[in-house]
Image (cartoon, grey):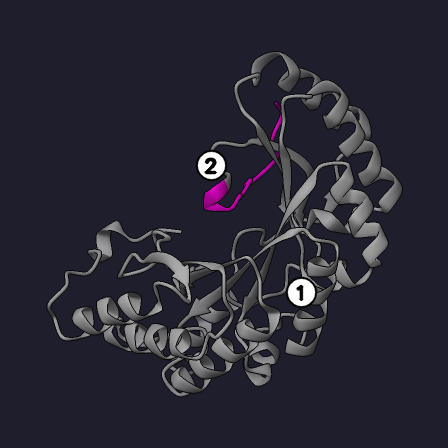
Amino acid sequence: MLYEGNVIRPPSEADSIILQVTVGCSHNRCTFCGAYRGVRFRMKGEDAVVQDISWASRACTRLHSVFLADGDALVIPMDRLVRILQQIKQQLPWVRRVGIYANARSILRRSVSDLAELKELGLRRIYTGLESGHDPILEKVNKGATTADMITAADRVRSAQIFHSVTALLGIGGRELSQVHAEATGKVLSRMAPNQIAILALMVLENTPLARDVAGGIFQLPSPNGLLEELHTMLEHIHCDRVQFQANHASNYLPLSGRLQKDKGSLLAMIEQAMAGKRSLRPESMRAL
């Protein structure tokens, strides 16, 4: 398997075959993201992808899922994406599902029937970054989509009956907009009604525009307790049901996992205990992206 540059996958794809079909991110303008800085986005050659699938057919017979990397591989033209999924189906018949990163714009380029066709070929999981439910924050971080775009994209994924995992980012509004961000994000997540909600905490990377704002005093990251308050407010305002809720990414100070609405009360109680100093937080040295 030949990889180029940083290959990033969701935590839940740790046991997947990582098939790199694009290099970099099609948007690559978010001020907080340093994953693909300086990398020109492009699709990998079809021959290279075919060779990687062939290698996986010999070396990855015990892995039952595939993740198509890098950022936003759903931007690949429909006919080519169909060929990739067909090749996976033919050469890796033991694979049960394929996952992919997708931003709102790439989802909205697909009709529901397009997405349903991709699902029939094995695409069973789409990962989308909401980051914030507050439009001024999305504009400030140059996300390239509005909350209306996010909600419409989520509706389309749901209509195609594809599992949808959506991430939100604690701290992205800074101290000034901390609670506004938390409340708005909880409300937008409720309207998106994904199958899985994944909460991460912002970690400022040196190679990003956001790092320059921090150094210049323009942006102030909330304290650990401030992030816990955000998490509590965000969770309070999430009212969708039968959704996996996970805040157990390594960036979070307080690892949490449960199912909403069933576990909502106990999750809120754990956050309150942590805010009161009755539950230990992950040490700064153990946090990571």
Check if mark 1's residue and mark 2's residue have beta carbons within 8 Å. no
- Is there any visible trace of residue 238 in the rendered image? yes
- Is there any visible trace of residue 45 in the rendered image? no
**What amino acid does circle 1 point to?**
Ala
The spot of residue 237 in percent (x, y) is 44, 79
**What amino acid does circle 2 point to?**
Ala
The spot of residue 106 in percent (x, y) is 75, 58
Q: Is residue 127 above or below residue 16?
A: below
Q: Nearer the viewer, residue 177 or 235?
A: 235
Which quadrant of the structure image shows residue 245? bottom left
The spot of residue 24 in percent (x, y) is 65, 47
Q: In this rendering, would 81 be left or right of 278?
A: right
Assess whether residue 23 is covered by the magenta stretch.
Answer: no
Residues in magenta? 1-12
The quadrant of the rendering that contains the N terminus is: top right
Mark 2 is surrounded, within 10 Å at the Cα level, by few (under 14), some (14 to 19) or many (20 or more) other residues, namely: few
Q: Residue at x 34, y 51 (%)?
A: 250
Q: Residue furthest left?
A: 278
Mark 1 is surrounded, within 10 Å at the Cα level, by few (under 14), some (14 to 19) or many (20 or more) other residues, namely: many
Residue that label 1 marks? 154
In space, the residues marked 1 and 2 are separated at their CA atoms by: 24 Å
Q: Residue at x 56, y 18 (%)?
A: 60
Residue that label 2 marks? 14
Q: Residue at x 19, y 56 (%)?
A: 283
Q: Residue at x 24, y 74 (%)?
A: 225
Q: In this rendering, would 53 be left or right of 176?
A: right
Work out whether mark 1 precedes mark 2 in sequence or the reverse, and give the earlier one.
2
Q: Nearer the viewer, residue 24 or 13?
A: 13
The spot of residue 216 in percent (x, y) is 40, 79
Which quadrant of the structure image shows residue 271? bottom left
